[in-house]
Amino acid sequence: MRSTTILFKDEPAGILSQLDNGSFHFRYVETWLEDKSKPAISLTMPKSKVEFSSPHLFPPFFHLLPEGANKQAVCKFKKIDPANLFGILLNTAQFDTSGAITVQQSIP
């Protein structure tokens, strides 16, 4: 299993995990849920104590991934399999994304 902290405007909002079977899980952290001023990270993932699960990478995170030649360059430079979406996300969405969501490399 691999996990990363999802940041929303540089504040921890949730934990994204990929299980050994390839499925993805997301849960909000308690501090984010308790603060009524904090928004959901996506309309498709409302704030809830229920863990979200999917056989595919969730759209809010999938859309952070590079495409085309940029994806090929990242995969070649970082030696990542192009099918390893979680690995690409960890290596490309730490800084300067097109929205408020970024990821931390890993959690302890």
Image (cartoon, helix red, strand yellow):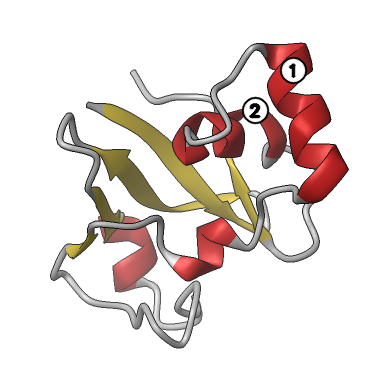
Picture quadrant of residue 82: top right
Is residue 44 placed above or below 57 in the rendered structure?
below
Is residue 9 placed above or below 3 in the rendered structure?
below
Residue matched to label 2: 91
Question: In the rendered structure, which amino acid carries the disc numbered 2?
Answer: Asn
The answer to whether residue 104 is visible is no
How far from the left and from the top, in percent, is residue 22? 24, 39
The N terminus, quarter of image: top left
Q: Residues within 10 Å of mark 2 (few under 14, many from 20)?
A: some
Judge by depth and name the residue closer to the eye, 32 or 87: 87
Is residue 53 placed above or below 66 in the rendered structure?
below
How far from the left and from the top, in percent, is residue 18? 28, 39
Question: In the rendered structure, which amino acid carries the disc numbered 1?
Answer: Lys
The C terminus, quarter of image: top left
Q: Determine contact: label 1, label 2, CB under 8 Å.
A: no
User: Could you say whether the residue bearing mark 2 is in a helix, strand or loop?
Assistant: helix
Q: Residue at x 17, y 29 (%)?
A: 20
Ranked by sequence position, the earlier of labels 1 and 2 is 1
The answer to whether residue 78 is visible is yes
How far from the left and from the top, in percent, is residue 4? 42, 35
User: Could you say whether the residue bearing mark 1 is in a helix, strand or loop?
Assistant: helix
Is residue 94 placed above or below 36 in the rendered structure?
above
In-image side of 60 versus 23 (left or right): right
Calculate the distance from the C-alpha at mark 1 to the C-alpha at mark 2.
12 Å
Residue matched to label 1: 76
Judge by depth and name the residue closer to the eye, 76 or 19: 76
How far from the left and from the top, in percent, is residue 99? 74, 66
Q: Residue at x 75, y 38 (%)?
A: 71
